Amino acid sequence: MDLKIGVIGAGAIGRDHMNRIMTKLQGAKIVAVSDIHGDSARAVAEQYDARFCETGEELIASRDVEAVIVTSWDPTHEKYVLEAIRHKKYVFVEKPLAVSAEDCRKIVDAEIAGGKQLVQVGYMRRYDSGYTQLKEAIRSGTYGAPLMLHCAHRNASADESYTTAMEVENSAVHEFDVLRWLLDEDYDSARVSFAKKTRHSHENLHDPQLIQLSTKSGVLIDIEVFVNCQYGYDIKCEVICEDAVISLPEPSNPQIRSKAARSVEIFTDWKKRFAAAYDTELQLWINATREGRVDGPSAWDGYMATYTATICSQARDSGETISFQTEEIPEFYKKG
Ligand code: ISE
């Protein structure tokens, strides 16, 4: 029997996920859709022969909704995840878990109080084949311990709605989660610097920025965030180990020889660059949910990513190096 999913948020990524569930993935179907823009939700609901719900709360409470996907506006994530926990329903929430560390902590506390893990957060890079190969190479120990990481998170362009704070809080949160997973350790301190501002930016966006993190074991990480790089959507990760340098593979787009030149397409859309990772992430979420488990990034991982963004924002605004004051991961979230 297919897992019956209700989706709150019929924007770009919500529609992307509904399309993959209904056309590519196995074992689930969309039965309800809600969005503050009723017309878009009604249109999508009709497309999938699903029900339109006036509110997210109505959708979560619906008896025919067995699991919930939250792809609504970031500031609404917390209330819908807490409501899903209250109804004891599995919930997949797109990043971030919540917009503040305090709100993330409320979700962690509610999930622990409920006694069962129900929440997975949409940090899809853990499912990207390039990152999983990087993690396996590090885990193997063949190349010695990681010492430093050089990363870049480049978007082709950012509109007026994209602000200085979003480089840390909206974009680099992906690195904060995936690098913590890659190295299997927490961060110790953070520093954020502004590079010379590109002319392609606008008044409310200082771009590019350089984020420097150190981990508890002393690994040094630098993350360039450049959201007006002009040429495309480009994600880099180079791991400097004791006996080798291991780099994130480029996406396997074909090399075109034409007009006395060679070229390889560079994605311009992050939803296309990580399409396969989203497919794997949601298929595994469907499988685990049907078996009553949470295998992916937990509410604690979501809390750690948003907490890291909070510390980096403090570092950016103060110009200082800020130390992390993280507690041990609760037993409730320890794997294995
Ligand atoms: C966007 O919100 C995302 O989540 C993308 O994955 C990220 O790469 C992009 O920079 C963000 O703006």
Image (spheres, helix red, strand yellow):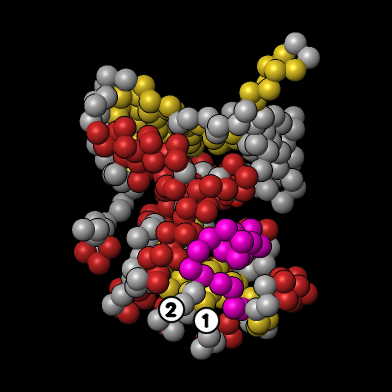
The residue to which callout 2 is attached is 89
Q: Secondary structure at mark 1?
A: loop
Q: Residue furthest bottom?
A: 63
Residue that appears at 25% across and 67% down: 332
Q: Is residue 71 above or below residue 202?
A: below
Q: Nearer the viewer, residue 296 or 18?
A: 18
Residue that appears at 53% across and 47% down: 276
The part of the image, by quadrant, that contains residue 179 is top left
Which dot marks residue 65? 1
**Considering only order in the chain, which callout, 1 or 2, is on the residue closer to the N terminus?**
1
Q: Is residue 54 above or below residue 14?
A: below
- The boundaries of the magenta stretch are 15-32
25 inside magenta stretch:
yes
Please, what is the three-letter code of the amino acid marked with disc 1?
Val
Residue 226 seen from this side:
no
The part of the image, by quadrant, that contains residue 296 is bottom left
Q: Position of residue 301 (x, y in %)?
A: 37, 56
